[in-house]
Image (spheres, rainbow, N blue to C red):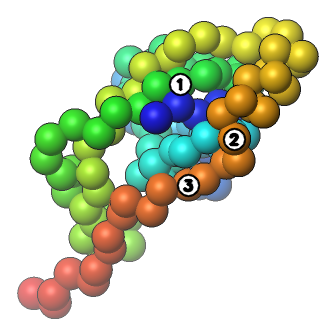
Amino acid sequence: MNAIIKVGLFRSGTVLDKNAKASIFCSVIAGSYPRSRMVMAGSVAEMHNLEPDKTYLVSITQTPGKAEYTTHDNLKGESLNWAITVVTEFKNPVELLQSAELIGESNVINDVKIAELEAA
């Protein structure tokens, strides 16, 4: 599946990761995009070649398995695994609008399950 995303810095309680990179937030402009990848650690974003204040056409593929994690407020989460590949960066607003029209409405795929951890 394909999506057009606008990348920005995640400003709500931004914490630098172990490589001193700030988290990013992906706003979906067009196409389908997984909820679990809307916020990424800065190092993960860098690995996917995503930079703040830029707009991209990305290709997203589901990969085998699931990712498990614990949130900062002690909730256990599970999401599908996704591979994200940057197809192109948009620099021309006309090309962006034309591509958005072809890809279709924005749709966030809810691939996240969260449950409270049992008290120890």
Q: Is residue 59 above or below residue 68?
A: above
Q: Is residue 102 left or right of residue 32?
A: right
Q: Amino acid at mark 1?
A: Val
Q: Residue at x 52, y 38 (%)?
A: 23
Dot 2, how many residues are within 10 Å of its Cα: few (below 14), some (14-19), or many (20+)?
Answer: some
Q: Is residue 5 above or below residue 39?
A: above
Tell me the SS state at disc 2: loop
Tell us which disc is closer to us: 1 or 2.
Answer: 2
Location of mark 3 (residue) = 108
Q: Earlier in the sequence, mark 3 or mark 1?
A: 1
Tell me the SS state at disc 3: strand
Tell me the SS state at disc 1: strand
Residue 5 appears in the rendering: no
Q: Residue at x 48, y 56 (%)?
A: 109
x%, y% of residue 112?
36, 63
Q: Which mark is residue 104?
A: 2
Q: Amino acid at mark 3?
A: Val
114 or 56, which lies in front?
Answer: 56
13 or 24, which lies in front?
Answer: 24
The quadrant in which residue 13 appears is: bottom right
Residue at the far front in the pictured view? 102
Q: Which mark is residue 32?
A: none
Q: Residue at x 10, y 87 (%)?
A: 120
Location of mark 1 (residue) = 58
Q: CA distance from mark 1 to mark 2?
A: 14 Å
Residue 118 appears in the rendering: yes
Residue at the far left in the pictured view? 120
